[in-house]
Image (tube, rainbow, N blue to C red):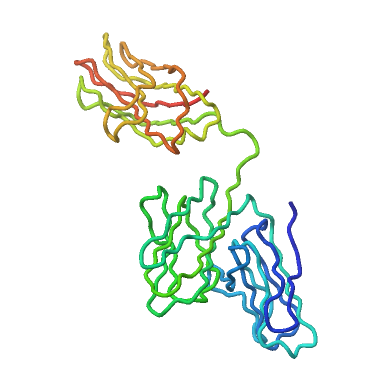
């Protein structure tokens, strides 16, 4: 998809021009004014279908405001569904100036929505952005905010633990950008009066058109050893996004170098899924034995198991000695594959 270059509708009388839809455009936008200005021209954005509008604001704080003292070129990072030009004090101009917009295509589909604002002090219902929302977001709050009021926009990875990412304390603060990666959004209100509208635009993430990944490899060049000679202990643990893999059935392969003295032994290494962090529990996906002697290569492949559906799976590599020898493994790789 090529870049977009378009002249925005500039009204000849005070008021707003016809909106220009920008939902398919990327976040970098350049706005150029050419021509005379008597009053001011403001470029506004909306993320709720054109009901609520506010001036575009870059993450540096620059506003999309053109006056007789400040014509020229402005660049903004913003994700908005549509833009329009508002004229104020330019009725005496014989012809309006040209206000042009240039922007690249969006790398992926952006998402737009309206957050739940509670009727009184408290938290609105969380909005689930799903798994394809990018880090860059633009928020538009429209409505009267009495002095001393606070509207906190909060983000969360899990829908339970939220942190503030942007704060509105007065009206007409603009279409404000913020960059943070999260899955859930919500509004915390500490204000009286009617509830304002809080809308957002969020860029998408680029997802290749080909098939999803078929395997995940977890190499470790270090060494892990049990502290006892007979108790199963966790050597390594990971949160692995196995749900992103394309195969519906997976195997796990463990390869590595098991360390031990000359002579027979029977130490065991296990790959477990789930259970409690730091504990040698959960489902056993694979068990591999090292019978020695000396340093020996461990190479084992599991039986097929269903691909997990949660966003991440707790995977633990454990070792258990034979009563005389601890389990020690180095230079190992865990490979999840079809």
**In which quarter of the view is residue 256 placed?**
top left
**In front of the other: 241 or 75:** 241
Apparent side of residue 75 relative to residue 6 in the rendered image (left or right): left
**In which quarter of the view is residue 164 placed?**
bottom left
Q: Residue furthest top?
A: 264
State the image coordinates of residue 167 (x, y, percent, origin top left).
43, 68
State the image coordinates of residue 89 (x, y, percent, origin top left).
67, 88
**In front of the other: 262 or 24:** 24
Apparent side of residue 79 relative to residue 197 in the rendered image (left or right): right
In this view, 110 is above or below 175: above
Q: Write the residue at 42% across / 79% down.
A: 146
In this view, 301 is above or below 119: above
State the image coordinates of residue 250 (x, y, percent, origin top left).
49, 24
The number of callouts visible is 0
Apparent side of residue 260 relative to residue 195 in the rendered image (left or right): left
State the image coordinates of residue 213 (x, y, percent, origin top left).
56, 33
Q: Write the residue at 65% across / 82% down.
A: 70
In this view, 231 is above or below 94: above
**In front of the other: 285 or 53:** 53
In this view, 135 is above or below 199: above
Q: Residue furthest bottom?
A: 92
């Amino acid at each position: 998809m090529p870049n977009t270059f378009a002249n925005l509708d500039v009204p000849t009388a005070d008021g707003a021009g016809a909106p220009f839809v920008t939902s398919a455009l990327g976040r970098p936008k350049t706005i150029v004014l050419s021509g005379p200005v008597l009053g001011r021209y403001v470029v506004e954005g909306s993320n709720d279908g054109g009901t609520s509008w506010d001036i575009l604001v870059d993450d540096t704080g620059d506003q999309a405001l053109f006056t007789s003292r400040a014509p020229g070129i402005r660049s903004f990072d913003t994700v908005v569904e549509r833009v329009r030009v508002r004229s104020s004090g330019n009725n005496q101009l014989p012809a309006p100036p040209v206000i042009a917009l240039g922007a690249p295509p969006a790398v992926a589909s952006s998402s737009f929505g309206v957050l739940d604002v509670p009727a009184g002090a408290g938290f609105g219902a969380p909005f689930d952005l799903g798994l394809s929302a990018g880090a860059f977001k633009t928020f538009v709050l429209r409505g009267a905010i009495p002095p001393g009021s606070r509207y906190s926009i909060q983000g969360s990875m899990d829908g339970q633990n939220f942190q503030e990412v942007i704060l509105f304390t007065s009206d007409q603060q603009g279409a404000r950008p913020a960059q943070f990666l999260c899955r859930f959004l919500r509004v915390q209100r500490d204000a009286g009066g009617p509830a304002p509208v809080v809308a957002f635009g969020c860029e998408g993430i680029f997802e290749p058109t080909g098939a999803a990944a078929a395997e995940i490899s977890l190499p470790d060049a270090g060494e892990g050893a049990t502290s006892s000679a007979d108790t199963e202990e966790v050597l390594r643990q990971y949160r692995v996004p196995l749900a992103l893999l394309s195969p519906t059935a997976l195997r796990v392969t463990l390869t590595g170098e098991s360390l031990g003295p000359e002579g027979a032994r029977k130490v065991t290494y296990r790959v477990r899924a789930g259970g409690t962090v730091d504990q040698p529990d959960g489902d056993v996906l694979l068990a591999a034995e090292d019978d020695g002697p000396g340093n020996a290569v461990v190479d084992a492949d599991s039986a097929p198991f269903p691909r997990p559906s949660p966003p991440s799976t707790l995977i633990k590599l454990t070792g258990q000695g034979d009563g005389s020898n601890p389990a020690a493994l180095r230079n190992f790789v865990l490979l999840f594959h079809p």
